[in-house]
């Protein structure tokens, strides 16, 4: 995605003094990292991270206390203490950071930096999902308290590199037609940012670690003035899609608007990935209906969908959903399919009643938005048939289908398992300025939290 015209400002990624763990003060770099805050949803997962190392980053991104105010105050106090004790220390000079993730044949590389914030109307950073106000408020309170960006957003742009790398190596990325798949190693590109990355990775990494999931992480610093100019010159012609982190982006914008004077709040911590070289994976985010049992959910949908019991276990049921989703997309007027799980059984929902969809899905949006699974789920199923309010007490959003089913069984609730949205649909709606329902997609691989932080108080 490029900004038209030679004078476009485009993406402005600036160096910053990264705040990083001092390796000698922690058990291991892997033990202090965490997935992004919104992926750590299971209580047992949170406890596992907290016990992995007393300095695990989860104590900052998901502090545990009795009230929101106490949680945010605790995170701020913890961050100050860790810096005073030398657990976290700033790098000596501002830098951009080349970040590499390698999972077997899957490879992703990008640049971590402080991105100048731009309003949506400038068309430089394109969101594609709506946000939940209570989440933005919570993240804003945490950022105010800590005066820090604790984890980067994931932004995707299409640079000038030769698109002969497949960033996931497993064929699940939703690539656009001009992005052939390969072995996972991106070839030399023509863009300045690509050349800087390829030169930088020839040096010894600043840090290397392998997390529990088997993913290798490497980080390099970029401080050479010529390299920084090359990156800046390249990126200013491009725009980016928010792949992961809509709530944090909305939080960045809110906190910037609170300040009249220019300063560090004018920038946000991001990981910028060139998807022409390293295509992202697109996965679904599933809905856990905590207070709706399958016995209540199924009778209501039988009037509006074809409902069939399907065989387990979960991987087999998900294959059935994928097959049904592909078949549904080929049928005009009936592109939706969902998998309901709960009570030890799986039920496939497809072929929704077109008249019901016409009545319940709002008009005035493109057909691609009106036929999204997330649109139909929220407007037809949740609002009209099940009357489930979209509040944390009623709905949980989970990336891991296994965790979602386990929680549904434990709570006696129902989980709606989704099929991923095609990446081209996401890009097209974003270009039109149309926001998808919140939590419609999960792009990845996501950066590990804890490798580099951005303090807004550092010079």
Image (tube, rainbow, N blue to C red):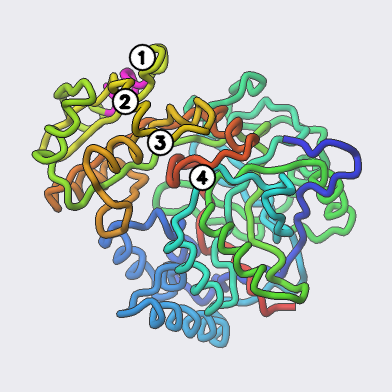
* Residue 327: image tag: 1
Point out the tag, 3 or 1, that comes first from the N-terminus: 1
Q: Which percent across, then down, holds residue 416? A: 27, 38
State the residue in front, 210 or 42: 42
Do the numbered discs 1 and 2 sit on residues whose CB atoms are within 8 Å? Answer: yes
Q: CA distance from mark 2 to mark 3?
A: 12 Å
State the residue in front, 349 or 38: 349
Q: CA distance from mark 1 to mark 2?
A: 9 Å
What secondary structure is found at the residue carrying circle 4?
A: loop
Q: Is residue 398 above or below residue 208?
A: above
Is residue 147 shown to the viewer in this render? yes
Which residue corresponds to the image point at 57% horizontal and 26% vertical from the top-left? Answer: 175
Is residue 169 shown to the viewer in this render? no
Q: CA distance from mark 4 to mark 3?
A: 11 Å
Q: CA distance from mark 1 to mark 4?
A: 26 Å
Q: Which residue is mark 3?
A: 375
- Structural crowding at the residue carrying mark 3, measured as other residues with C-alpha within 10 Å and reported as few (<14), some (14–19) or many (≥20): many
State the residue in front, 199 or 116: 116
């Amino acid at each position: 995605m490029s900004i038209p015209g030679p004078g476009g400002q485009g993406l402005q990624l600036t160096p910053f003094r990264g705040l990083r763990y001092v390796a000698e003060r922690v058990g291991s770099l892997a033990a202090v990292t965490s997935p992004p805050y919104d992926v750590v949803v299971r209580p047992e997962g949170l406890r596992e991270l907290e016990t992995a190392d007393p300095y695990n980053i989860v104590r900052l991104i998901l502090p545990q206390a009795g009230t929101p105010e106490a949680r945010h105050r605790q995170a701020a106090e913890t961050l100050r203490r860790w810096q005073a004790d030398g657990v976290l220390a700033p790098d000596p000079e501002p830098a951009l950071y080349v970040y590499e993730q390698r999972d077997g044949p899957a490879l992703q590389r990008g640049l971590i930096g402080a991105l100048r914030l731009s309003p949506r109307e400038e068309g430089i950073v394109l969101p594609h999902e709506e946000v939940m106000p209570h989440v933005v408020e919570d993240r804003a309170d945490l950022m105010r308290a800590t005066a820090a960006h604790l984890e980067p957003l994931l932004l995707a742009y299409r640079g000038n590199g030769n698109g002969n790398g497949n960033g996931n190596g497993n064929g699940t990325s939703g690539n656009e037609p001009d992005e052939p798949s390969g072995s996972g190693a991106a070839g030399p590109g023509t863009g300045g940012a690509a050349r800087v990355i390829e030169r930088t990775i020839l040096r010894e990494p600043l840090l290397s670690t392998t997390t529990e999931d088997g993913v290798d992480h490497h980080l390099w610093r970029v401080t050479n003035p010529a390299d920084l100019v090359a990156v800046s010159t390249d990126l200013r012609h491009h725009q980016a899609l928010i792949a992961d982190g809509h709530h944090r982006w909305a939080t960045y914008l809110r906190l910037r608007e609170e300040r009249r004077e220019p300063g560090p709040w004018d920038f946000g911590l991001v990981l910028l990935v060139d998807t022409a070289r390293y295509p992202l994976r697109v996965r679904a985010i599933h809905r856990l209906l905590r207070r709706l049992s399958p016995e209540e959910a199924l009778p209501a949908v039988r009037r509006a969908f074809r409902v069939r019991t399907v065989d387990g276990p979960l991987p087999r049921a998900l294959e059935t959903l994928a097959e049904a989703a592909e078949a549904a997309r080929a049928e005009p007027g009936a592109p939706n399919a969902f998998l309901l799980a709960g009570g030890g059984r799986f039920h496939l929902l497809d072929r929704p009643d077109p008249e019901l969809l016409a009545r319940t899905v709002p008009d005035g949006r493109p057909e691609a938005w009106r036929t999204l699974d997330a649109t139909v789920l929220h407007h037809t199923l949740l609002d009209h048939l099940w009357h489930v309010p979209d509040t944390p007490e009623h709905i949980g959003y989970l990336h891991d289908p296994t965790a979602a089913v386990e929680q549904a069984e434990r709570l006696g609730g129902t989980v709606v398992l989704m099929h991923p949205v095609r990446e081209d649909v996401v890009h097209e709606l974003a270009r039109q300025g149309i926001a998808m329902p919140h939590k419609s997609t999960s792009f990845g691989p996501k950066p590990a939290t804890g490798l580099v932080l951005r303090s807004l108080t550092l010079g």
